[in-house]
Amino acid sequence: MPVYRIQHGTTYRHEAPAASAWQTLHLRPADDADQRCLEFDLDITPRALDLATRTDAFGNTLHVFSVRETHRQFAVHATSLVRRLAPVLPAAADTLPVAAARAATDAAVLEGEFSLEQFRHPSPLVPALPGIEALLADLDPAAPALETLAALGEIFRESFTFDPSATDVSTPLADVLRLRRGVCQDFAHLYLACVRRLGLAAGYVSGYLLTRPPAGRARLIGADAMHAWVSVHLPGHGWIDFDPTNHCFAGDGHLVVARGRDYADVSPIRGLFNGGGRHALFLGVTVEPADDPVDTV
Amino acid sequence: MPTAPASAPPVLPGYFGQPGRYDEAVAPDRTLRPAWAQFLKTLGPDPVAALRAAGDHARRAIVEQDVSLNIYSGEGSAAAAWPLDAVPLLLDAADWSALTAGLRQRAQLFNALLKDLYGPQRLLRAGALPAALAMANPHYLRACAELGRSRQPFLHLYAADIARSPDGRWWVIQDRLDAPSGLGYALQNRLIVRQALPAAFGQTPVRRLYQFSRDLRTSLDRLHARSDSPRLVLLSPGPANESYYEHTYLARHLGCPLVEGGDLLARDHQVYLRTVGGLRKVDVILRRIDSDFCDPLELDPRSLLGVPGLVHAAHAGRVALSNQLGGRALETTALLSFLAPLCRRVLEQDLLLPNAATWWGGQPEALAYILDNLHGLVLKPTFGGQPARYGAVLSAAERGALADRIRAQPSAWCGQERVLLGTTPAWDPAADALRPAPFVTRVYLAWHEGDYHVMPGGLTRFNPSGEDASVTLQGGSISKDTWVLAPEAQTDAPGLHQVLSAPASAQRHGAATPSRLADNLYWLGRYLERTGQLSRLLEKLDPLLRDEITALDPRVAADAARLLLTLQDAPAPARAGLDELVALARRTAADRRQPGGLVSNLLRLSRNLDLAKIRLPPEAWEIARLLRPLGAEGASPLPAAIREHLVTLDGIVSETLIHDTGWRFLEIGRRLERAAHVLHLLRGLLGAAPDVPGPSEFRLQSCLHLADSLFTYRANFHGAIHPGGVLAWLVAEPENPRGLRYQADRLGEHLAALPDELAPRPVEQLRTAAFRLVSAARLFECESENPGPTRLIAFADEQLALLADLNARLARIYFAHSDTDPTGA
């Protein structure tokens, strides 16, 4: 069971002094069936005297605080220790074809799993996109859903180019589809649009990748910043995570922080400053293997 | 079936109900309904004349009391007079009691639904509420999840738009669950109409509104369980909002501060009001900002109206909101088709009030029905965002296109049966008669001690064009008072005015003047004084020009004209002659584009009057109304006309305002401005004097005259005008209310009375600065025999710099909303 130490630093440098700030954070790695957050530490400057923790509507940990000192620089440094299992994928043949999975999702929603429904509709950053059908045209409707997810990943591999200069956080999804270029967040959103178009429930996952891969494995794209991928609900098997930027299912190097409908639900730092003018943003993410504290005791 | 007589009832000439609609006044057999028969009797022998007179009376009252509604019109929005028809809607007692039972049930139901939606979500889990109605609903605010678990009501204030169906039963057209508006206008309408129809109101057993108002304040206070004397504020989007007038009215009525997002500060899991005495904890917020815009941190980040951190404070349970955030989620039309079964499930009762039959496209059978019956339905987007479409008026092609859109996203559409609204008599000024008008009435309910109380009245609206497609006030509709008749006559003992006196809790918190209000009052004082001084100077210029000495020596008049230009921040050309200077000074005064000109100052005065409205008596609102047109484009007001209004305003300000902290800020602004005025006058008239050996008697006399001090000087000095005496009178004399010393003394007193908790040291420095002004004025006496122009200019400049410094310190300490630590509970 690999254990990882995650260092995530974010620094805002203002061009003028800011008198105060209000911020929310989605930075604490999640606890779920395949992952355990063993340690988590936040270092915020200037001090956040009223730092509070809440659980958001998706079950993620949310930090809320204000800063009341006049400052030119605002920094959040999160350190966490995470134990992660490789998710076990169902056998593809055990998964239903898309149409049947859709019907099974309908039934699940009616039978109490109502919250699946929010992952099937357009969301703030993933609107209904005309033209998305073209990406789905070559999918085999008879194939098991798990294969369909992988096949859609291959379509993404052929159709899109990773290009950090092509988009920024405010680029509308329709432009990404037109440009055929973007970053992990764009591809996750597009992949969400595709899967929701198929009628399945799909959510956005924000998290991390291992900075330096184990010997013999290629370094994945997105390892030096926060990463994003997609989680698809397959009835009978639960949530299956797929990384449309690297065209693979998530493995034990995909460390989950938060899940939501799209980036807007789980942005790692969101907030506002009173004053400060424009700011420059500096990000640093390092994810390294660490000793398991249980093993070393 | 017997044929109805073809004529209208004799007292309603030309009045005919419309086919297929229920009319409030006339029954299908053309007889008058009892309430209307009784009402018409109270109008005397000539009801038409009485109603015409009432309409005129109401119109005048609206203009005089400056009741307004901001109409959005693209870029610029403008305040329009509040549209009110003096003819009330009459609802009889039996009718009302059936209606209120249904409305109270509905409020209970929505409260339970909201508490569940933002709490345990049992109804969603059980499928009683379709998942998509919440989960795909853009108005379901995930940041507010779990807020429904509080023991307080989620829905504190509920409003329903109701209308009469053709068979005479009431329908609910729309439920308002977020921040229902219009309550203040309903209360205001009552005050106006009862005065417009005094005899009718006196002889009709109309149920009074005071009890509801009083209970509303009590129940708002009780929303906060932990505080004995909770601080209530009314949170408004600000003067640009369509119903800002109403916010002002309601805040006065409830006796609570009217605040905007910028007045509040959320930190340490609570909400504070920024006051001149520091941060004060806020316990209850009656909000008039839609939920989505209430917190840019956790809700719509584009909102400039909200308070960052408000949602978190609500989660922490430290601030209670009326209503709790997120209610708009259940305003979706689609919910109406599930309301009856939900009512049976949640309250174990049958739903008492029907709504128009509704089909939600998210259900296959309903979708089929909608698509088969497009021509007869009203098609509404499930979550709003675009106008309803009337199937009946669409062309075949349009209907086809709409059907395609519905098929593409069925759950995003609802079909609703078209409702023919009932009609009630409304005064048609063009026809000089009553005409039937389709109407909708908004009724208000407030939670009070475990149940909902219904206000026996409401805000009725009708569309004067006679159509009922949309009855909103933005769309040119007209409002009415709503008279609910009591079973028997009521005594009029406790009047509505009683509620107008602030409740005890408001007085306890009285010392805490919000910083922004203090800022407004300070500038109100400054602009009031400055506008008054400028208009007086302009008025006095004429006699000065006509003076025979001016004909011989124009220098004094020219200096006065130069002074007028300086005071209006306009350059005075060095070589210009008297006529040119005077013309320039007058042009500057009348020009709206001259930021320092008289009219510009007048406009700023008007704006500050509007902003500080909540603290001013109604008489001041009237002056505000009279001043506004004087600053309008193209108006060239006479200085005398402006001065006249300002004298009245002055009187109101000094005689009717409570002498509290807010008033002191107004006075500080006034004194500061008046002190600056005297200094400018000395500098411009005596400092500029090249006369040898000293200023002429005419110059000294003119200086006193322009300083409004000639009369008092003569009385004091028995006529002899000499430089030493004039300077002593204008600078050092503590008894001359127009002199510098007097202003300095008053400034010192007011500053000493301001709170200093916010910043003890800077406040001390501020007071020291004021003391320096007093000393300077006092000491000037010793050397004032004839200091000469150079010394005079130096003195005036020193003191003007001191005043500018006072202004800056005041703003920094009290108005800048600096986020100092909380100092009081």
Image (spheres, helix red, strand yellow):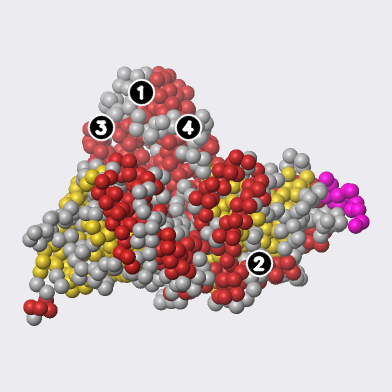
Q: Nearer the viewer, residue B764 or B246?
A: B246
Instruction: Name the secondary structure under disc 2.
Output: loop
Residue B769 place in picture, x, y as percent: 25, 51
Q: Is residue B2 magenta?
A: yes
User: Which SS does the magenta portion mostly show?
Assistant: loop
Amino acid type, callout 1: Arg
- Residue for point 60% across, 74% down: B344
Which residue, given by chain and number where applicable, does mark 4 sit on? B539
Q: Which residue is located at x 68 percent, y 67 percent?
A: B99
- Give the residue number, with chain letter if any, for mark 3: B789
**Gap between marks 4 and 3, in whole Å?**
27 Å
Provide residue B81's location: percent of width, then percent of height.
Answer: 59, 45
Spatial distance from mark 3 to mark 2, Cα to Cα?
84 Å
- Residue at 58%, 63% (x, y): give it: B336
Q: Quadrant of residue B29?
A: bottom right
Q: Earlier in the sequence, mark 1 or mark 2?
A: 2
Identify the residue position indicated by label 2 in the image.
B353
Neighbourhood count class around disc 3 (C-alpha, 10 Å): few under 14, some 14–19, many 20 upward: many
Tell me whether circle 1 and circle 3 mark residues in contact (CB < 8 Å).
no
Q: Residues within 10 Å of mark 2 (few under 14, many from 20)?
A: some
Q: Is residue B717 left or right of residue B417?
A: left
Residue type at tag 3: Pro
